[in-house]
Image (cartoon, rainbow, N blue to C red):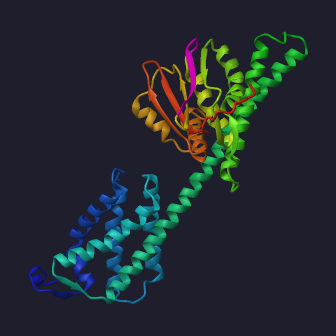
Amino acid sequence: MSDSLNVSSEVIVNLLEFITKFNLEIVELSEKKTTALASLRPISSELKKGLPLFLGQLVMVLEKSSPVVSVLDEQKILKVAGSQGREFLRLGYTLSHVVHAYGAICQAITQLASEKKARLTSPEFHNLNRCLDIAIAGAVTEFEAKRNIQTKVMEVEYLGCLAHELRNALSRAVISSEMIIKGVVGSTGSTSKVLQVSLSEIDTLLNKAIWEIKTRSKSDVNFSHFFLIEVLDQLLLTAGVEADRKGQTFKTDIDPSIELNADEHLIRSALANVIQNAIKYTKKNGALSLTVKRVKQTAVIQIEDECGGLSKQKIESLLKTSLKVSSEGTGMGLGLAITQKALKHCKGKLSAKGTTNGCVFTLVIPCIALTSKEFSPVV
């Protein structure tokens, strides 16, 4: 390319010549644009390799001066783009990032051409657009395929973990009941408590499975009127057994007048998970409390535990956990993910904050305004 590209008058040049001479500047400008798109997401060396590789492939296509991209060249572009798609997914990018990253290449070329006072010949832009189209399709296809595999793996892990916990709880329940039936132990002793706890765990796990099916199905959320105390009373009966087993004290202060218009099953799931987390992670002989009060048109439910305390960063991480098997198995991460999703369906929300010895989880749910009529919850 002649040095006349650097003068003020506009010069007509072909795309191949332009990319060859200004390759490094195109790469640098494209990287700036893609970095801006990435925001706080990481940029790996593998991801950065993709841009120079694509430009090299584009040069090879343009050198052939053919209006059609050959099958071999198309396969090479798809291979590199597919690798990029997998890397985008690994680093936590979205499909939008994948598409716009390749779009940034075209933008960088046209912007740089304008700055260099160069008017690029239009026929070659057809091959540029064709190569970009192939690359985007390859990256998107691989991105989606890999994401689908990850989703299936997570679902299998979730079902496997659920089945494992169900089997363990059922095994404890069967052994305990056999000992009681045979008269080896009494019906009101420690073995009886093990049976109660095991049955409670089975009920909880089945509720999680039913909830998962319910929220994934296309059926509507079933809103109905019910008193919150009725749901909590059933949950606290089984929670009390587990708390007693660990020597924990569990104080409650519940406004019995609060009535909700929500999906009772989802609210039950949300509350059960937070209460069970509190008991599970509170130390032996620790203290827990549950308060429920009306604040304007909402029911504010607070569960305070003594889990030893969590940092603000850890709490934020837990509240961002998606519905998948977390590092704690079906522990706090999964439980809170279920709670948040259930509350979202009922127009509620979950928040948390750390204390000196533990955490306070707050559930806020819209409630029915209290009228002068007498309420009659069944407790």
Task: Please provide the residue range marked out in magenta.
Answer: 284-295
Q: Position of residue 224 (x, y in %)?
A: 70, 44
Measured as percent of width and height from the top left, residue 264 is found at 69, 40
Q: Is residue 289 above or below residue 272?
A: above
Which residue is more in the foreground, 56 or 213? 213
Residue at 31% x, 78% y is: 59
Q: Residue furthest right?
A: 182
Question: Foreground: 143 or 224?
Answer: 224
Which SS type dominates the magenta stretch? strand
Residue lying at 62% horizontally and 36% vertically, measured from the top left: 270
Dividing the picture into quadrants, the one containing residue 292 is top right
Q: Nearer the viewer, residue 215 or 143?
A: 215
**Splitting the image into 4 quarters, where does residue 183 fall?**
top right
In-image side of 248 versus 163 (left or right): left
Report x, y in % for residue 267: 64, 38
In the displayed structure, does residue 354 sit left or right of residue 227?
Answer: left
Question: Residue 79: image x %, image y %?
Answer: 46, 68
Q: Is residue 293 rendered magenta in the image?
A: yes
The quadrant in which the N terminus is found is: bottom left
